Every structure is written in C-alpha cells, then in structure tokens.
Image: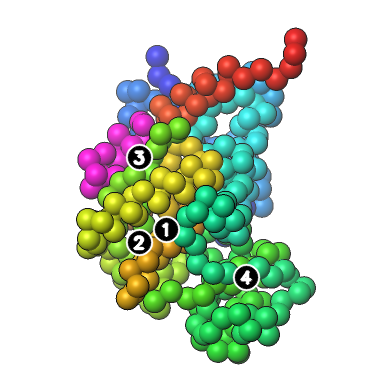
C-alpha cells in the first residue's frame, strides 16, 4: 500500500517562490510506486488549496505523513508544526520548539552560546527603537544587519558607513520587529547538512563563493552566478570541526530530521563561527542541502525517503508520551 504524503508548500513568507521550486523537486523525487502525493498549496494571502489540514486527530484520514516545504515565516517557525501536532500527524523536520528557536537568529545564538558553541558578537534592536549610535559604539564597520526571523537572506544588508547602517536598520525592521546586528567576519562562508533525530550525522561541508559581496537572496535564487566548492577546501581538522559543530548546533536548538547549518570561517585566525541554522533548507535543483548529501553518498531520492522515515520514527516515539494521569 502506498504511503500518502501531503506536500505542503507556498506560504505567506517572502520565500514563497523558493518554496514552490523546492516542492516541485521533492514531488519529482517521490517514487510513485511507493508514495501517493497530495498537494496542499498555500497562497501568499494564506489561503489553502484545495482545502486546509484540520487541527484535529483523525480529521485528515487521507494523510499518512506531512512534508512541509514552507521556507520562512508561517512555515519554518513552528506555526505549521503546531498544526501537525494538533492533528496528530507525522511530519518531516523539526518540531515546534526546534523550528521556532532555529527561526529566530538571536535565540539560536543564545542557545549555542549556552552550549559553549562559537557565535559572532551581536546586538539586538527593535522596530521603533533602532539606534545607529549603539551599533557604532560596539562595532567597527562593516556590520551585517538582519531581520531576526526570516530566511534566504531576505532583508539582510551589509553596512559600511552610517548612511548604509541607518538604511539597513530600517530595511531589516520592515521584515521583523526584532533586528540582529553582527560584526562582519572576513573569510569564507561554509555550509554543512545534518540528517537524523536523536543521533544526527553531518555531511561533508561546502564553501559558498558569492558573486556579490555576500550570499544574498539574488545570488541564491536569481542570478545563478555564485559558485560552490564541494567538498570545501579545508584542512582535515577544520572539516571535522565544522561537522562536529553542525551536529552540536542541531542538538542545541533541539531540531530533528534535517537542518543546514551555515558557518563563517574567519581569516586569518582560522576560527569557525556558527552563523545560523535552517530547519527547512532549500530543496531546489541547485540547493546545497541535497547536493552535500549526494556528495556524501545519499542521493536526492534516498534523502527524501530517509526524511519521511525519520518523521514516522519520531511520531511513533512521541506516541509513548502520556498527556494525562488517566
């Protein structure tokens, strides 16, 4: 009997178009002899088509497992994961807590710092209380300014002077109430894919070679001019450290299933910093998460199979949890 997979995609975030491309790649990789695909498209205004998943146990009898492919807000932040929990449906990827914590760049940094994992120095400011003077008191230029809760580098700017900083703060605050400002790191941008539940494993990392000053949204999805080095040209010791930190970051944020951890390798110090973690990384034909696993011996279709297996495994384990004394 075929496993009925509900692929949920689209969504209200600024990464709507990326989600569409990721979903089509995943659907194409699902073996029709093993899986029956059900599409659940969410428009930019938040309307579901053909109908929404209902938040009640047993109310979605045609679904065996949900595969959310919703990048960013209202999909990668714990909201849709809460829906699946209410519906008692197995689902691919991190749970409510892990999704929410990983989506917030500041919370990720706090959790990593608490575990002794290296993160770049940063400040937090809020929409309505943006303060360029505070940034200049703490950091030299350049600095990165980011919305705390968004992905695919949407709303991120690199500021080299006061004028650019003020513009960057306003731009980031348009996408989120909370803004993160970081010291800019001179060096390499690295990524590492992680797969698993309680005992995750890491792929070989890759290096991103942006065509622009940093790996922004246009460079990721529109220009097609960035390059990748896979595996990343690192020493064996640095490669091992990146892979170790990727797993430790996933555990610190309590993610499950999959994650892509992004790093900054500072030169000339050689220090590796965790930049952020993505719980629903891009799954397009050019996305690095499946490419890193392919290089590490796991094909795209095998990766999708494994993610579904991990979702079912986690749901079975969660059913052993008691929710009342009766």
- Marks 3 & 2, CB-CB < 8 Å contact: no
What residue sits right under mark 3 in the picture? 201
* Classed neighbour count for the residue bearing mark 2: other residues with Cα under 10 Å, few (<14), some (14–19), many (≥20): many
Q: Is residue 194 left or right of residue 141?
A: left
Magenta run includes residue 147: no
Query: Which segment is the magenta one?
Result: 292-306
What residue sits right under mark 4 in the picture? 123
Marker count (numbered): 4
Residue at 38% x, 63% y: name it. 272
What residue sits right under mark 2 in the picture? 190
Name above or below for residue 292 compared with residue 174: above
- Marks 2 & 1, CB-CB < 8 Å contact: yes
Indicate the secondary structure of the residue bearing disc 3. Answer: strand
Query: Furthest residue to the right?
Result: 128
Query: Furthest residue to the top?
Result: 326
Between marks 4 and 2 in the image, the one whose residue lies nearer the viewer: 4
Locate residue 253, reporting x and y percent: 54, 46
Locate residue 36, reporting x and y percent: 42, 26
Indicate the secondary structure of the residue bearing disc 4. Answer: strand
């Amino acid at each position: 009997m075929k496993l009925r997979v509900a692929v949920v995609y689209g969504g209200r975030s600024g990464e709507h178009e990326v989600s569409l491309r990721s979903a089509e790649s995943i659907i194409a990789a699902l073996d029709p002899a093993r899986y029956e695909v059900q599409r659940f498209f969410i428009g930019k205004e938040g309307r579901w088509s053909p109908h929404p998943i209902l938040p009640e146990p047993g109310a979605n009898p045609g679904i065996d497992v949900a595969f959310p492919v919703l990048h960013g807000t209202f999909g990668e932040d714990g909201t849709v994961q809460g829906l699946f929990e209410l519906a008692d449906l197995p689902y691919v990827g991190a749970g409510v807590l892990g999704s929410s914590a990983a989506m917030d760049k500041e919370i990720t940094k706090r959790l990593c710092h608490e575990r002794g994992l290296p993160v770049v120095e940063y400040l937090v400011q809020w929409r309505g209380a943006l303060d360029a003077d505070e940034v200049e008191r703490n950091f030299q230029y350049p600095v990165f300014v980011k919305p705390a809760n968004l992905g695919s580098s949407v709303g991120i700017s690199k500021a080299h002077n006061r004028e650019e900083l003020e513009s960057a703060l306003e731009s980031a605050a348009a996408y989120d109430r909370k803004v993160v400002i970081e010291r800019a790191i001179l060096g390499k941008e690295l990524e590492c894919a992680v797969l698993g539940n309680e005992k995750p494993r890491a792929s070989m990392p890759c290096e991103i070679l942006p065509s622009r000053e940093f790996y922004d949204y246009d460079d990721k999805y529109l220009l097609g001019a960035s390059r990748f080095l896979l595996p990343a040209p690192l020493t064996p010791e640095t490669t091992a450290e990146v892979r170790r930190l990727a797993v430790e970051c996933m555990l610190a944020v309590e993610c499950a299933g999959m994650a892509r951890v992004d790093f900054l390798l500072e030169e000339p110090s050689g220090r590796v910093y965790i930049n952020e973690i993505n719980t629903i990384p891009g799954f397009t034909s050019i996305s690095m998460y499946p490419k890193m696993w392919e290089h590490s011996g796991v094909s795209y279709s095998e990766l999708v199979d494994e993610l579904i297996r991990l979702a079912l495994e986690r749901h079975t384990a969660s059913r052993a949890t008691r929710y009342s004394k009766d």
